[in-house]
Amino acid sequence: MGGMWMHVLRSVLYGLVVLILAGVALLAGIITAKKTEQAPPLITVTAVPPEERAAARELVEQALAARLAGNHSVALASLEQARAHDPAMRGLDYQFTLTYLDLGKFEPADQAARRSVDRGEERSSAQALRGSILLEKSRAEGKVATAGTEILTHLEESRATDPLNPMPLYIMGEYYRADGRPGLAVEAYRRALERVSKTDSFLVTTVKAGLAGLRLNYQADHPPLKLRKVNGVLPPEQLFFGAADALLRGDHGAAAGFLREAKTRMPEEVFASLLQDSFFQDYLEASILEDPAQPAPPP
């Protein structure tokens, strides 16, 4: 029973929690961090000309698009250019943290996360990411057990900053799973899930943006889309992208397989909402989802 709960909870949280990183990152340059008694002192910076600030924002948009497509080196280069235009842009350190972590560059990722915390930007999520960075580094080195105390300290700091943030609890579940304690992992995943909306807008927005990009960029001679796995499993948004790519190539059977798997991974409300996207309304024959044994319709 514990194994079943582990699979179900982790599958749902791949989309509903990890993708909150992307949602938070999109808002990082807009939301002003709350002031606390321990807030860092204000940083005095030289005023940035409007044209430089606009150029920096455009480069960050390019970085986000590149990261969504899995082009992390391109994303990093765009962020570095953005920093050259506007060194004081709010949320930029958090963006660097996410990108360095995707690239497996743990030390630069941790340095960027600490800067984000010190500047009072995305403090809870940045503190949680410090725990995630240490977890990934210790996994790579085979030292998860010895890093446990420090990992949990970062996560508890994150929870103290924002008790409603699901991210530290999700990462806590990942730590307990890696440390061979599935019972504690399941409980952490459950608690994280309690803090995530069933109709999570970040997941929906991410999938819709990806569907629009696939439709706009599709060319008949393109190879099949290379999907990105997380810990050997395709996250929910990748399943939708795989289904969309299969539909564009006329492979209705593969599309149905991807969507049937996605349906088992997320709340029914979210799945139904995503099937209402104009992409699926235009390309998907709903009947192919009804019976796994039913042959796929002709392209």
Image (cartoon, rainbow, N blue to C red):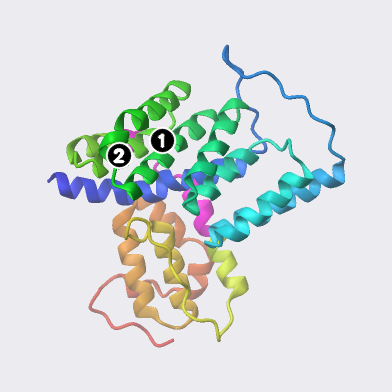
Residue 220 at x, y percent in the picture: 56, 85
Residue 293 at x, y percent in the picture: 22, 78
Give the quadrant of residue 143. top left
Please say if the residues under marks 1 and 2 sit with CB atoms less than 8 Å apart. yes
201 drawn magenta? yes
Residue 5 visible in this rendered orientation of the protein: yes
Which residue shows up at 50% across the image and 78% down it?
A: 248
Quick one: label 1, few (<14), some, or many (20+) residues within 10 Å? many
Q: Is residue 245 above or below residue 197?
A: below
Does residue 178 appear left or right of residue 83 in this picture?
A: left
* Magenta residues (range): 191-208
Which residue shows up at 36% across the image and 61% down it?
A: 234
Task: Quickly name the residue at label 1.
Answer: 131
- Which element type, helix, strand or loop, lies under badge 1? helix
Quick one: label 2, few (<14), some, or many (20+) residues within 10 Å? many
The outermost residue toward the top is 37
Amino acid residing under circle 1:
Gly
49 drawn magenta? no
Give the quadrant of residue 215. bottom right
- Which element type, helix, strand or loop, lies under badge 2? helix
Quadrant where the C terminus lies? bottom left
Who is closer to the viewer here, 80 or 253? 80
Does residue 189 appear left or right of residue 279 in this picture?
A: left
Who is closer to the viewer here, 193 or 271? 193
Residue 163 visible in this rendered orientation of the protein: no
Who is closer to the viewer here, 2 or 95? 95
Q: In the rendering, which numbered label is found on residue 100?
A: none
Does residue 109 appear left or right of residue 11 in this picture?
A: right
Q: Is residue 111 above or below residue 34?
A: below
Task: Quickly name the residue at label 2.
Answer: 175
Does residue 130 appear left or right of residue 175 in this picture?
A: right
Circle nearer the N terminus (1, 2): 1
